[in-house]
Image: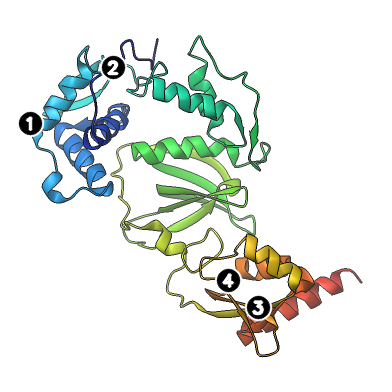
Amino acid sequence: MIGCLQKIPCMPVNKSALIRYLALDRCLQRNIRPFTINGLLNEVNRCLEEAGYGHSDAISMRTLYADLKFMESESGFNATIKREKKNGFKHYYYDIPEFSVIGLNSILHQEALELLAHIKGILPIDWMNDKMLKNKHSLIQKKAVLYFNHNPYLKDNEWVMIIYKSILEKVVMSIKFNDEDMNVYTSMFHPWQLREYQDCWYLLGIESEQNTIPKVIALNNIVSINPLSGIDFIEPTLNEWDELFDNALGPIPIWNKIPEKVILKVDAHIDRMLNKIPMHHSQKRKTDAIGQIEYHFQLVHDKELEKQILALGPGASVLKPELLKCKIIDLIHEMNDSYK
């Protein structure tokens, strides 16, 4: 069966080895632009470093060859790894691209599928269900008991897995998309990360080496995607993505903007809500001299902040900064005028 293990390895696997096997598994599934042995070594050591291992824990070429030999062995994963010589270098990839060491017969994998089969609203479930179709003990018919807020009719759903695979395989894409004014653009895009925000997906990446500021494209604005071959993929230049979003509420990374103190005066209802569901990690609850409840934040003023404040309704008002306060007042007047 494609993608299934015929024999489950019973030898204990330490954390370092598990990371190495999973990294190699992902690399070997890439048969469009397969890795050389040096590429595999660099990728495995990069994954180890990301997992917290130091430079002294980097593996040698000898260890890499031993890992590949184990993956091909009967005591390992029975993988069939092809070695094809191109331009004077051997390139390594699975004979069957759908193969994975995380086989559907694995006990751990089976338990994970059991859980996922009971969850409704996680977008990659469609991909998991496709995998499960190949298993005679398919779990697709399991009744969902956990529901996540997810709209299956969103336009961006069709692009998520295409982009996800392109990110893993480091494939440059030609993306045609609309801007907010419905102007159509075509961009050669190096995809780095997918982010979900309020039931919509956004792609973060870069267009070229000359334009070093990452760009964000809303997936529901995408018209078409085509993979491009023969173009070197530009690797991400940042190690910690979340730092780009620390001082903002929405899916757009903040560049060259300094966060400022935002103070909201709230009533008892909004107080209870923000206490249970914080609006931002910088949130601090305070009371003034007369007992009025305030919430203090360190945030950049953008459209998403304005939307969040308006969503709180009459139970919240801006005290500082003055520019944000005036903007909210203007928006409220505009809303009021639209109902006249």
Percent across and percent down for residue 158 are: 57, 35
Judge by depth and name the residue closer to the eye, 242 or 190.
242
* In the image: residue 219, left or right of residue 227: right
Q: Residues within 10 Å of mark 3 (few under 14, many from 20)?
A: many
Disc 2 residue crowd, few under 14, some 14–19, many 20+, Cα 10 Å:
some
The x, y position of residue 320, in whole percent, is: 62, 84
SS class, disc 3: strand
Label 4 sits on a secondary structure element that is loop
Q: Which residue is mark 3?
A: 264
Given residues 232 and 258, the one toward you in this image is 258
Asked if the residue under mark 1 is in contact with the one under mark 3, i.e. CB atoms within 8 Å, the reply is no
Closer to the camera in the image, 271 or 202: 271
**Secondary structure at numbered mark 2:** loop
**Disc 1 packing (10 Å; few <14; some 14–19; many ≥20):** few
Residue 95's disc number: 2
Q: Which residue is mark 1?
A: 62
Picture quadrant of residue 330: bottom right
26 relative to 1, above or below: below
